[in-house]
């Protein structure tokens, strides 16, 4: 499989529990993004990595959210003490950065749908 | 001001007609612009990208870019029922070089 892979596809959790999602980008893609999408809205930026370096975190990302990409390959997104407002689709995308400001497109995984009950 | 704005409501077009979608962006230095299509319950998929002012055509799709007006548009000619989806405008922001999305426009093609 040469696409972006996300696991799990669906997650139902009780409020207050911790959850962790995994994203495996396309091989050799050095840039990896995490987005959150709720119904009727576009993908909302959460954070992104250039190789293993986390270059930016959204101001909307509370301290309960943390992301890692330890070896510059796969990435994990953890949400601690989940709240009902965290229910959303969490999308991962990867791209291969080339010429400055002329990035190639980002390819998305199928997403992880989180439901907090 | 939002980084990327798509303000039109759902767009209904008859089969075979032209669907026109608009997008504005706030970062004047942005250089790279994308249109993604997203079917309900699915992840976004790229359909067009454009870097230069003017028009870019790919099959039934035409992207138009006007950097002076900070405006990007997408035309879908000969609309088909399979074009019914949400179309997302995305921009690589100059300031921090990351990808930002608009909220999307839903297109419904009526047979």
Image (cartoon, helix red, strand yellow):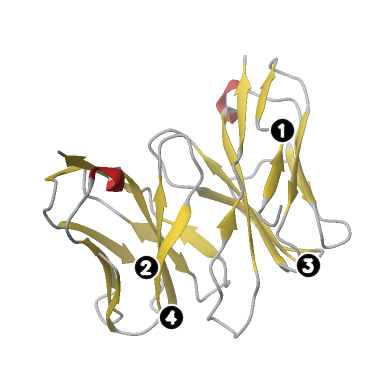
The answer to whether marks 1 and 3 mark residues whose Cβ atoms lie closer than 8 Å is: no
Can you tell which mark lies on residue A92? none
Q: Which mark is nearer the camera, 3 or 4?
A: 3
Q: Look at the picture and state if A105 lies above or below B41.
A: below
User: How far apart in space, not on screen, are marks 1 and 2 (Cα)?
Assistant: 35 Å
Q: Look at the picture and state if A67 lies above or below B48.
A: above
User: How far apart in space, not on screen, are marks 3 and 4 (Cα)?
Assistant: 25 Å
- Who is closer to the viewer here, B100 or A5? A5
User: How far apart in space, not on screen, are marks 1 and 3 (Cα)?
Assistant: 23 Å
Q: Position of residue B1 (x, y in %)?
A: 36, 58
The residue wearing badge 4 is B29
The residue wearing badge 2 is B26
Can you tell which mark lies on residue A51? 3
The quarter of the picture where residue A51 lies is bottom right
Q: Position of residue B86 (x, y in %)?
A: 34, 45
* Subunit that carries the residue with mark 1: A
The residue wearing badge 1 is A8
* Subunit that carries the residue with mark 2: B
* Subunit that carries the residue with mark 4: B
Are there few (<14), some (14-19), or many (20+) residues within 10 Å of tag 1?
some
């Amino acid at each position: 499989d040469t696409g972006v892979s996300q696991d799990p596809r669906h997650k139902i959790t009780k409020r207050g529990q911790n959850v962790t999602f995994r994203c495996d980008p396309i091989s050799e893609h050095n840039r990896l993004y995490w987005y959150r999408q709720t119904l009727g809205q576009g993908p909302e930026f959460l954070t992104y990595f250039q190789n293993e370096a986390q270059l930016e975190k959204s101001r909307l990302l509370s301290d309960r959210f943390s992301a890692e990409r330890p070896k510059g390959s796969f990435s994990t997104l953890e949400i601690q003490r989940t709240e009902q407002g965290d229910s959303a689709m969490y999308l991962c995308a990867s791209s291969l950065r080339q010429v400055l400001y002329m990035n190639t497109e980002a390819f998305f995984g199928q997403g992880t749908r989180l439901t907090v009950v | 001001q939002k980084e990327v704005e798509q303000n039109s409501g759902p767009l209904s077009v008859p089969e075979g007609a032209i669907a026109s979608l608009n997008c504005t962006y706030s970062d004047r230095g942005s250089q790279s612009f994308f249109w993604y299509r997203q079917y309900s319950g699915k992840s976004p998929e790229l359909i067009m990208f454009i870097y230069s002012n003017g028009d870019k055509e790919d099959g039934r799709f035409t992207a138009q870019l006007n950097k002076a007006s900070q405006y990007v548009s997408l035309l879908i000619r000969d609309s088909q029922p399979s074009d019914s989806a949400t179309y997302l405008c995305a921009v690589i922001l100059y300031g921090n070089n990351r990808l930002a999305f608009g909220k999307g426009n839903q297109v419904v093609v009526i047979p």
